[in-house]
Image (tube, rainbow, N blue to C red):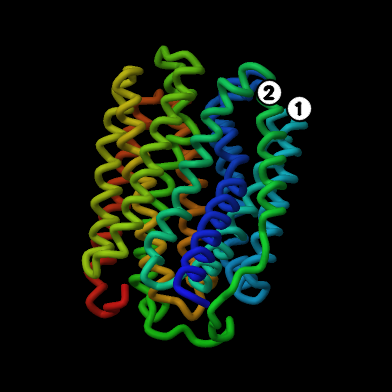
């Protein structure tokens, strides 16, 4: 295959991976963006919203490791198709929900989709994208969550406040089916057997692997509170639902830019990648402090900084992890994927409970502390880097 043909194939792969990741995450981001309408019609509070979003992550936590191993055996394309079909089915289920319980059950089903699509996406990138563009590929792939948040935010004024929130989930299901139709087998590089020992990677250093999982999980816990609660918090502070939704969209767009930029940058740097992760997530801490002011105009800036930092680091994170475990990218994804899922459970549930008990400012300050702990975990993991230069 010529260089031009290889580049085109890599570009198509990156686009498909990003689209598949977006639609697998849409159900939970739609729930955060449409929280005001959902809470009004289904009659539940902030704590219940946190539990519902947490259940999405619970199912992901329970299935992350086995799904990672399954992907290494089933293959990336078939795994991704299955993940998208689950997301589409769950979106239609949420659209029919008549109670908080039904919403929670369907979000739990939806949580299985990213648990399968994440290792599938990582495997597809490792096997179909050239090594000199792998960081850029992960930047594009990791722009998917803020893109999902952006689409969900835009659904508030375009669909939620005109046609009703249920139709936003129907639209998400239709989009997912469109992505399924675009999935075809991609040319791949050969990988060792899925059960072969992983050589020269972070899996040989359990301490580093646990620190990475902890840092990732804490970062996800902090970031998840913005996507799930910002609209509700901003409306409570005095914003209109339209303005709050659009503000979250702006913050998501900035996060997309940070992820893309960090992915391109990581292809050009050879050292300090984990320190870069720590810097980004620590900057996010300032955003949560701004959100705690409970002033709508300041909260917009807070959402931008918080999402830019706590979402911006993940492109670098996954590049570091997967490129140092190329023998089994699905397996390497499993433990941090579980950490991320656990963070996604604890963050919204804790935040929702704190809102009910002490109000939004206290909850945002707690997210700031969680974000700071994430940065510390990455700093500690970076100190182990000397033992594993490929990290």
15 on left or right of 84: left
Q: Is residue 216 above or below residue 43?
A: below
The answer to which of 166 and 182 lies nearer the viewer is 182
Q: Is residue 195 above or below residue 44?
A: below
- The location of residue 132, given as percent across then percent down, is 36, 70
Helix, strand or loop at mark 2: helix
Instruction: Residue at 30%, 28% (x, y): give it.
Output: 301
- The location of residue 180, given as percent across then percent down, is 70, 53
Instruction: Residue at 59%, 33% (x, y): give it.
Output: 31
Q: Which residue carries the number 1 mark?
A: 98
Helix, strand or loop at mark 1: loop
Q: Which residue carries the number 2 mark?
A: 42
Quick one: label 1, few (<14), some, or many (20+) residues within 10 Å?
few
Instruction: Residue at 56%, 43% (x, y): give it.
Output: 54
The answer to which of 82 and 213 lies nearer the viewer is 82
Q: Spatial distance from mark 1 to mark 2, Cα to Cα?
A: 7 Å
- The location of residue 236, given as percent across then percent down, is 45, 16
Return the mark for residue 360: none
């Amino acid at each position: 295959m010529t260089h031009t043909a290889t580049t085109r194939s890599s570009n198509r792969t990156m686009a498909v991976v990003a689209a598949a990741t977006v639609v697998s995450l849409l159900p939970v981001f739609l729930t955060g963006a449409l929280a005001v309408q959902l809470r009004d019609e289904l009659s539940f509070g902030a704590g219940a919203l946190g539990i519902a979003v947490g259940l999405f992550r619970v199912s992901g936590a329970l299935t992350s490791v086995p799904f990672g191993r399954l992907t290494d055996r089933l293959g990336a394309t078939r795994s991704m198709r299955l993940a998208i079909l689950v997301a589409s089915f769950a979106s239609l289920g949420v659209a029919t929900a008549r109670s908080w319980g039904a919403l929670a059950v369907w979000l739990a089903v939806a949580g299985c989709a990213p648990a399968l699509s994440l290792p599938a996406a990582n495997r597809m990138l490792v096997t179909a994208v050239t090594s000199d563009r792998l960081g850029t590929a992960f930047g594009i792939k990791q722009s998917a969550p803020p893109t999902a948040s952006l689409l969900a935010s835009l659904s508030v004024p375009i669909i939620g406040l005109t046609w009703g929130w249920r139709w936003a989930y129907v639209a998400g299901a239709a989009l997912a089916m469109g992505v399924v139709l675009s999935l075809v087998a991609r040319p791949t590089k050969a990988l060792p057997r899925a059960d072969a020992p992983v050589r020269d990677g972070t899996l040989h250093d359990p301490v580093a692997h646990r620190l990475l999982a902890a840092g990732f999980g804490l970062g996800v816990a902090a970031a998840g509170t913005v996507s799930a609660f910002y609209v509700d918090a901003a409306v409570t502070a005095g914003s209109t639902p339209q303005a709050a939704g659009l503000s979250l969209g702006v913050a998501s767009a900035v996060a997309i830019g940070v992820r893309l930029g960090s992915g391109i940058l990581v292809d050009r740097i050879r050292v300090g990648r984990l320190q870069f992760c720590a810097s980004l997530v620590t900057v996010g801490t300032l955003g949560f402090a701004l959100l705690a002011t409970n002033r709508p105009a300041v909260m917009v800036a807070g959402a931008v900084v918080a999402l830019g930092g706590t979402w911006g680091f993940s492109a670098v994170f996954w590049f570091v992890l997967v490129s140092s475990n190329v023998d089994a990218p699905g397996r390497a994804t499993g433990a941090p994927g579980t950490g991320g899922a656990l963070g996604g459970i604890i963050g919204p549930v804790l935040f929702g409970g704190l809102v009910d008990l002490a109000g939004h400012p206290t909850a945002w300050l707690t997210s700031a502390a969680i974000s700071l702990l994430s940065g510390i975990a990455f700093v500690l993991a970076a100190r182990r880097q000397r033992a594993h230069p490929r990290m």
